[in-house]
Image: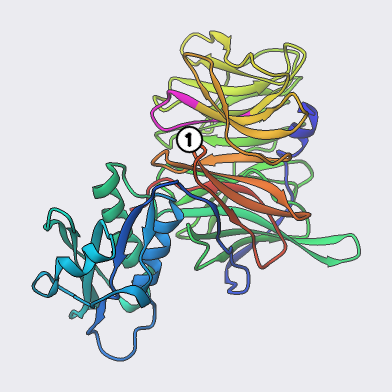
Amino acid sequence: MIRTLVALCFVNFVNIAFINYAQAQLVIEITQGRDDPTSIAVVPFDWKAGGGEPVDVTAIIEADLERTGQFSPVSRDDMLGSPHESSEVFYRDWRALKVDYLLVGKMLPTANGVVAEYELFDVYTQKMVVKDRQVGTLSTLRDIAHGVSDRVYEKLTGIRGAFSTRLLYVSALESGPGQFTYRLLISDVDGARERVVLESPDPILTPSWSPDGDTIAYVSFETSRPAIFMHKLSTNQRTQLTDFKGLNGAPSWSPDGKSLALVLSKDGSPDIYVMNIETRELKRVTRHYAIDTEPSWMPDGKSIIYTSDRGGKPQIYQVTLANGYEERVTFDGSYNARARVVPGGRSIIMVHRSEQGDYQIALQDIQRGTIQVLTETSLDESPSISPNGAMLLYATKHRGKGILAEVSLDGGVKNLLPSQYGDVREPAWSPYLQ
């Protein structure tokens, strides 16, 4: 199985410019929330920016908050009023609906676009808890909505919102007998504004984000051997980084964005290397006859966790870059692979094989070694964590189709994200974006 994982680190595709592709969108299906979510009323924002409202900003905010499983938005049909500012709020109406928080606002024109002015109220204390504004244009109304969601979520949970981040993933659509078209796609976290970055008749796997969110790294077979490329999204500039004999794969960005951890077999068995992006200088990190693969950086940039079968079966190890000291991290179970570090560095998520033989996503406390299985399906893979550490994204099978799914790190919230366009896989959650 570990050798299969190594093989899947390599892809072959042809490069294309950004292509708009509106048909292929993820559809979010909420399957499990918390038992006692916070009730919130998001009153439709008053549109005063002229013409019809091209995007339902309020609906986006409602969906963002509901998807977390922590909030239960009140139906618009049940609302007893439509306030748009504090002077129009009558708390008794919202207490009658057992609403905990009330969000009101209006969309106003500016010289360069539009501004959302909004207020959040605690219904039971009858106090304003947020008064803020989001500025943008008619073309960035979704960004405005996600920005409001981020602010509200952070104020009510104490955790920074991640609604303004992006998702990166691969879709596969059958284009003929035994033939597929693969696309590397970027979308909002709710699946909207999906666009094609790369397209190929061959598989695309293991893309990863740079810390600034403007560059991705991947592997291509378009030359005579697998090679690692990086692709700057803002300019569509593409650069080949490796062309060594043997395996070239599994690129992973360092926290400072100056280096890539990667897997090369140019000196024998697959080992972990670190490349300086600017100078292309390589440093070999592991030296073992076994297969070392799937590197992921610790937040301080001083060590790397990776998968190795040096003990006979795939397990997670950690290597300190300064002195090369290696230690095993996982001991529970016969298979643990593709680990990713939770923000803060205290835990990892990984693919874990249960006693029943199912491959599921699990969370392990690094210091204590305790494992919590977060998913309930049997073929879960490719976990990726939101930058606020609240949710993780992974690929799985549902009704015979490859889909993406979300689960909170306590396992209490679960969502499915099937696509209208073929199977989807290989998700990567972006960092916070500027």
| Viewer-nearest residue: 67 or 257 | 67
The residue sitting at 57% across, 9% down in the picture is 327
Query: Between residues 270 and 240, which one lies in front from this camera angle?
Result: 270
Q: Position of residue 280 (x, y in %)?
A: 53, 33
Residue type indicated by callout 1: Asp
Image quarter of residue 301:
top left
Residue at 47% of width from left, 57% of height from top? 189
Magenta extent: 338-347
Q: Is residue 195 visible?
A: yes
As for residue 342 lying within the magenta part, the answer is yes
Residue sitting at x 59%, y 36%:
251
Is disc 1 surrounded by few (<14), some (14 to 19) or many (20+) residues within 10 Å?
few
Q: Residue furthest right?
A: 177
Displayed quadrant of residue 336: top right
Any magenta on residue 49? no
Q: In this image, 180 relative to 402: left or right?
A: right
**Residue 240, relative to residue 106: is it above or below?**
above
Residue behind mark 1: 410
Residue 245, how many percent across, how many down?
76, 32
Locate residue 117 relative to residue 429 in the image: left or right: left
